[in-house]
Image (tube, grey):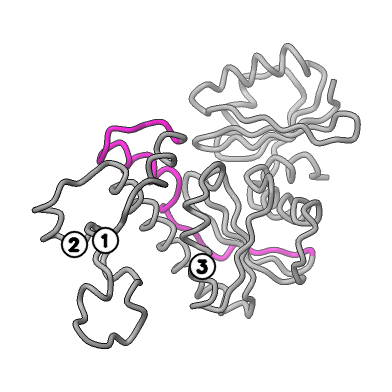
Amino acid sequence: MANVIGIDAGGTLIKTVHLENNQYCYQTFSTNDIMEVVLWVNENHREAKLMITGGKQTKLAQLVDNEVEMVPEFEATTSGIQAIVNQANLALPDSYLVVNVGTGTSIHSVNGKSAERLGGTGVGGGMLMGLAYLLTGRTNFQEITRLAEKGDRNGIDLKVKDIYEGASPIGGDLTASNFGFIERIKHNEVKNEDVLACLIGMISESILMMAIPFAKTTSTANIVFIGSTFQSNPLFRQQLERFEELFDIKAYFPHRGQFSGAVGALLYR
């Protein structure tokens, strides 16, 4: 039985972390099934202190009988990612950018033991799920990412090479307009997997284009991407990694990065 449990109660998922035999134990629940978290705590960790962070922390705290301490979300995220980066033995300098892609996206600058939230956007996993449903009727995250991997963005996304007949000022394979190839869309069959591939491309590119100016402002080329949106979603990573050379950045995707908030809450003192 754990003495302390770190819990990140987010808008879409609830992540928990606790120590058992000096090993981190991780679990994930849907926020829509918050009573499953309460049941799990009651059956397995009734005496544990709960260190709770995230947007749904108040709601969860009201449902449990355990001793509870509320942890500020941004402090939990940044301290948690520092712990996860150390565990993953990533060769990072003291200064780097953290892009946390959950329901929305939050961007933090880390410098040694200090951290600062720089900004954020509503573009993230919640947007992916909402638009995937509106465009294809799909609601299962694993199914959405599996289909997207089979998709082809050509013919839906308008590329730079589709505009310039001769030499272009930038790479021809770059996106000129997401979902912008109207003539082909009107005259060709549009498959769900192609739409989903374009959707993931749009979200990943939008997040990266927002992160890069922050990286330049803070004089770092190292960007650490975390969050549940990257879990079991290699297409997101591929879309981001293809821009490393173009923008002179290095992207990192630490193992268990989506648990940074829960880990930070667990370690909070």
Q: Earlier in the sequence, mark 1 or mark 3?
A: 1
Q: Nearer the viewer, residue 143 or 129?
A: 143
Query: Mark 1: which secondary structure?
Result: loop
Residue corresponding to mark 2: 181
Q: Residue furthest top?
A: 43
Of labels 3 and 2, the one closer to you: 2
Q: Earlier in the sequence, mark 1 or mark 2?
A: 1
Residue at mark 1 to residue at mark 3: CA–CA distance = 22 Å
Q: Residues within 10 Å of mark 1 (few under 14, many from 20)?
A: many
Examine the image and state in which quarter residue 85 appears: bottom right
Instruction: State the extent of the magenta-drawn residues as a range.
Output: 113-141
Q: In the drawing, what numbered circle is on residue 211?
A: 3
Image point 45% across, 45% down: which residue? 125
Residue 236 location in percent, x, y? 48, 53
Image point 36% across, 79% down: which residue? 171
Image point 82% across, 30% down: which residue? 4
Q: Nearer the viewer, residue 73 or 149?
A: 149
The answer to whether residue 66 is left or right of residue 269 is left
- Disc 1 + disc 2, Cβ < 8 Å: yes
Q: In the drawing, what numbered circle is on residue 88?
A: none
Q: Could you tell me the amino acid type at mark 3?
A: Ala
Residue 93 location in percent, x, y? 76, 71
Location of residue 50 with respect to 220 vertically, above or below: above
Point out the image quarter for the N terminus. top right
Residue at mark 1 to residue at mark 2: CA–CA distance = 6 Å
Query: Mark 2: which secondary structure?
Result: loop
Location of residue 173 with respect to 8 vertically, above or below: below
Q: In the drawing, what numbered circle is on residue 157?
A: 1
Q: Residue furthest right?
A: 21
